[in-house]
Image (cartoon, helix red, strand yellow):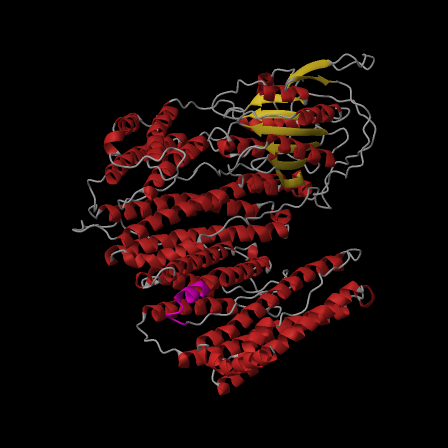
Amino acid sequence: MKRFSILLILFAFIISPVAAQQEAPQTSLNHYIEFLSQSSEQVIRRFKMLRDYQDDVARYRKKPDYGLRLPSSGPLEEYYYQKATHGLGIEAGKRKQLNAGLENVWHVLNKLDETCKALETYVRLKDYERDKLKKSDALVEEIQSLFERYAHDKNALYTQIRQVYTGVQNRPVTDPYIVTEKAMGEVIAAQQRLLDALPYYLNEENKAEWPVALVRQSILDDEKVLATIGNTASQLQYPASDMVGSFKSALTSMQDIKRRALDDHNFAAQQSARHGNAVYLSLVEQFNHDMLEFYKAFVGYSRPGHLLLNYPFFSPVMKAEGANNVASAGKSTPPFQDRSFQPLNVKKATAPANAAVVKTLNQYVDWINESLRQMHLLQMIVRNYQSSAEYYRDPAKAQKRANLSYSHEDFKLPSSEYTLLLSASSAIPEPYRKSVTGQAEVLMNILQEMDGLSIELIRYTSEKQYLQDQLKRSDAILDRYLVLFDILDKKKEQLYNDVRRIHESYPNATPTSSWYIAGSAMLKTMDNGHDVMFGLRDYLKGEASKLPETDRLEADSRQLIADEYKNMKGLQRYGRSNGLCPYTPYEDLGANAGRFAESVQKYKPDRSGYAAHPYESFYYFYNNELVYEYNNFIELSKAGLLKTINQPDVFAFQRTTPQKPDVPPAKIEEPKIEKPRVEKPAEAITQVQANNGDITATPKPPARQDTRPLANEGAPANAPITQVKRDTVYVERVRVDTVYVDRNAQLQNVTRSLEGFAPNNMVLLLDVSSSMNSPYKLPLLKRSIKSLLTLVRPEDMISIVLYSGKARVVLKPTSGAKASEIARMIDLLQSDGDTDGNEGIKLAYKTANKQYIRAGNNRIVLATDGEFPVSDEVVDMIRQNARQDVYLSVFTFGRNEHTGQKLKKLSELGMGSYAHVTDASADLQLILEAQAKKLAGK
């Protein structure tokens, strides 16, 4: 046995040099790369630790009783370091040079580990309480410098590795694997250069320049690469060939991050480093764990025939604090640079358009639609601002109010799409290119002036200039907005018409295909719908004496339905639940076109004077039910068809006349309500049937132990707010509940003022599930809320709870002094997800009780389009809260009034009101809820 052991040792000694010679140089070099990637992962963990720690430090400086914490870290991993040092397949002299660079990286990594652990010990000992974070600042500064040293030494070592690899790679440059490796490597190097140029600031409050031009150029470069990379995939063996497509998808994902980053870099984002920091970390994560992982897989699947080199992970660094030289609100906004263009003189082409031309023309349509979407958002913002600003026209009254504010942080210039559009325009024939690119430039100039005017309004309101000029400059800006909205509307129409003329100058490649036949029939319907829409606009503007004729649109609707099986012959039907089914948009467009024509003919002016502009419902219907369905069909088609554009709501923003001096509102006799008698026995109760049991609603509440916070916590400190007190004394309720009174009579006599009414603690419990996506639902809900926002006072508190999907608070109790902020939140509401009514009700009551106002109007308003199961627990909660002055009202939405009784019973149980909201009543319903309780003594 002893002899055998000796022989085994001798055998291992003999074959070890042979094994060393058998390890390929590329394999040894990849051990170095593996060490660098693993080390970079440790650096990234330290990077994120420092970021979170610095956030805690910032909070501690503001509130010293907030303790600091740092997670404990373990020892450094030495396995990959030891593995790399052997370098068995590399010539001794070169291995010595590489190991010297390896030692530099390992030394910095150990120094970083020691410094971070010193910071951990410092925090655990709470020495920051003794030296006021002096040592903390020094350690943080040292860690930042070590990040930079590590990145420098890592890159230096990788350069050495690359040089050795070039010397040992003996494959011909025309080899498909080498060609693919080179193409991928160029993409990786380009992303690394961008990451090296992007800043990350430890102090997120820092204002510094962000390299917009560099990101824009990177987007353009990526777009060119995406058009060519992967051409060699067919020459590679599976699964290496499959990794080329995955690598391309990773580049597409990085491109999406850059595009969002460019668009999101608006004025609000420029006021801090948060936007740039978030983009930086997103790109690092995508680069390391998506792009490089797919490249590594390509390298692995290329073996054993091709031995290629991996790339190390990127390691982040923190830049020095930059100068605060970002853009600030300017003094004045210059008018946009306008240019006039004659309609294109288009000549008929002899051959069909290639795919690049069709794609580019559709990009123009998409960009116009995105521009219109941003314009509509700005229309809503300035409309809300205008309604708030009128209360500040009188300087004496304005000084007593909370500060007037303005923000357009949700408005984003479609910069990335515009950049790609100009680049793709090279596919358009030269005779037409200059005109369409010039028109797109003018539209972008208009959007930039709109953005500039909003930035000016931010400065105007923050400096309280309205106290000096009685809103003179504000009026001029709003007047200019009205002009710009109209100009953009007209110019987008000319651009679309020219784009369409270019498209129609080409013969279609497949004129007999069902895609083309059906698409052409749908386009004819859209053209007639467009004419009806513009005729309606002219009528509502007073430029036409009668409503537009809808005969042709009605005929198109019928024809689309009648010819469905002929037009769609041969196309696969997948079912309405499948988004790839072309029959769904075809059938919906046919049906919706008829409904649109019918609604136009049945239009009658509203005589109440309170409803929103009638064009709004037509605007939503036309874009959501006609344009959307048509464009959906075009996206599914394979016939080179062109999308169409949306139409703006030209009446969304209209100038109001300056507010006249306040006149005391006329007294309106309130419905007489018999109050419960105090001496009435408690046993006299009302039985309310809900779920499967009898629920009792007792009219007199017990005393309330209340330790909730004061009202108006979200209001500015200097806002003149009615003092709202809370204590445990029960105050007799004065209710105006529509369960017991005629709501129609109230709508006719309502006064648009909250003067004399109790402070409101109103929680809006909103159903924004996908079923609310209808002109008769979500738009009316938004309108109703915004009508109330024109009247709310600083003492009124508004909260918003959504219950599509998971119930959540999207707006914490906010003072009426911030009506414009509340309005912006309303504008962002979108229909999505399923309904979770029970959890929504629970969360709404929790929110209402936290902000409870003694003797105030504490009320939850549930807005939905349909009934949902209600648990016994929730029913009991509604009953108990109604006894304690937190009421539940229910609004329903939809084309037809609901016949179900469950929601009505919930409102009765919650001692609130029940109403079906229509176009005629949307502006007043929520105002009535806010007027449900008078001030004491009124």
Q: Is residue 892 above or below residue 45?
A: above
On the image, which quarter does residue 741 sit in? top right
Q: Residue at x 43, y 66 (%)?
A: 300
Q: Is residue 762 visible?
A: no
Q: Which residues are magenta?
A: 296-307
On the image, which quarter does residue 122 sit in? bottom right
Q: Is residue 774 above or below residue 449?
A: above
Residue 356, horizontal then vertical, whole percent: 29, 54
Residue 703, horizontal then vertical, whole percent: 82, 26
Q: Give the side of residue 75 with respect to residue 642, left or right.
A: right
Q: Is residue 238 above or below residue 485?
A: below
Q: Is residue 157 magenta?
A: no
| Observer-nearest of 570 and 887 | 570
Q: Residue at x 53, y 36 (%)?
A: 657
| Observer-nearest of 84 and 865 | 84
Q: Give the side of residue 743 with respect to residue 240, left or right.
A: right
The image quadrant where one finds the C terminus is top right
Residue 170, horizontal then vertical, whole percent: 36, 78
Q: Is residue 300 magenta?
A: yes
On the image, which quarter does residue 50 sit in? bottom right
Q: Is residue 267 above or below residue 561?
A: below
